[in-house]
Amino acid sequence: MVKGMRSQFAGLVTYLFLGLGGLASIYPFYWMLTASTLKETDIFKTPPRMLPEGRFFANVHNLAEQWPIWRALFNSLFTAGVVTISMILLSALAGYTFAKFKFKGRDMLFYIVLMTMMLPTQISLIPLFIIMTKLDWINTYYALIVPFMVSGFGVFFMRQQMLAFPDELIESARIDGGRELYIFVRIVLPTMKSPAAALGIITFLNQWGNFIWALITTNDKEMYTLPLMLSTMVSPGNVVKYGSVMAGAVIGLVPIIILFLFFQRHFISGVFSGSVKG
């Protein structure tokens, strides 16, 4: 009896902490959504306004009049989309090569790929910026896209998935006369939907929030990405209209939510399949 009461009490405390943690996590997003629908004078009132009003589209209109928000949204979508597609294709191709081909220096090359995962991103910023400057790629899509088209993590992740693909199927396809690229595209790649979706979502999220690199390589408003534009709006010297800023943040959140809703099943299965395959 006493043991049962203790178990119930422990369960109640656990759910209480989980509930408080959930509310603490959700509240900033709820406040952002609410603030995007309020007048400037109502956003920081005490006590805070907890219910939304109907000024969201007015705040979006004010935002679009002062800043090229739709251009920034396009820049973010275009760069994140191209990087995501290239990351999936190039990482899958490299991972397939490391997993299924034996050639001299393969292990050494793979160790070098693994080493790139250990390097902090900040270390490569200055060399990359110098390269972009020499190539005259500042304020271009090349600077925002090319350095992130493939990564050590992507190659490692896809290589781990490719190891589980049966060698017998590849050999059968070769005996039937299939060329290597045909085998990769038509036989191997279609079985990697879940890992590819997981890698794609991770890449898109990273690239969507890639603020530092966009700050370094762009100084033209027409090339600003959405996070960079939102940060510029609240920088010192500007008259900050928080209703418009929050409306822009909500707009920036929509593509991420849509992406996750469409691919969440593949994302979860892809991540977990990577944890059990060797």
Image (cartoon, rainbow, N blue to C red):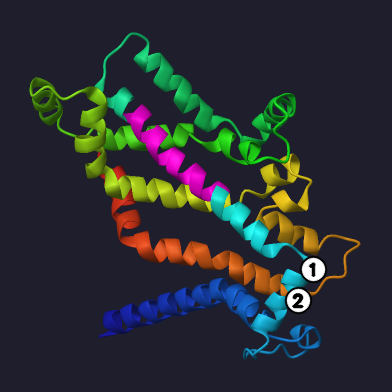
Question: Residue at horizontal 62%, vertical 91%?
Answer: 51
Question: Quick one: quadrant of the N terminus?
Answer: bottom left
| Marks 2 and 1, how far apart at CA | 7 Å
Q: Is residue 206 visible?
A: no
Q: Is residue 182 above or below residue 175?
A: below
Q: Which residues are magenta?
A: 79-95
| Amino acid type, mark 2 | Asn
The residue closer to the viewer here, 15 or 237, is 237
Say left or right for 229 vs 88.
right
- Seen as rendered, the residue at the extreme right is 237
Residue at horizontal 65 percent and vertical 63 percent from the top? 70
Dot 2 crowding, Cα within 10 Å, few <14, some 14–19, many 20+: some
Instruction: Identify the residue at horizontal 15%, vertical 27% (top origin).
Output: 170
- For numbered disc 1, what is the local secondary structure? helix
Residue 133: give x, y in percent of width and height: 74, 28
In the image, residue 120 above or below residue 263: above
User: Toward which corner of the image does residue 214 lie, by quadrant?
Assistant: top right
In terms of depth relative to the viewer, which is nearer, 99 or 227? 227
Asked whether the viewer can see residue 79, the reply is yes
Q: Which residue is mark 1?
A: 66
- Disc 2 designates what residue? 62
- Given residues 77 and 26, the one toward you in this image is 77
Q: Is residue 91 magenta?
A: yes
Q: Quadrant of the C terminus?
A: top left
**Does residue 4 lie above or below 176 as drawn?**
below
Q: Position of residue 202 (x, y in %)?
A: 46, 50
Image position, residue 162 (x, y; %): 26, 34
Q: Amino acid at mark 1?
A: Gln
Q: Are marks 2 and 1 in contact (CB under 8 Å)?
A: yes
Main SS, magenta residues:
helix
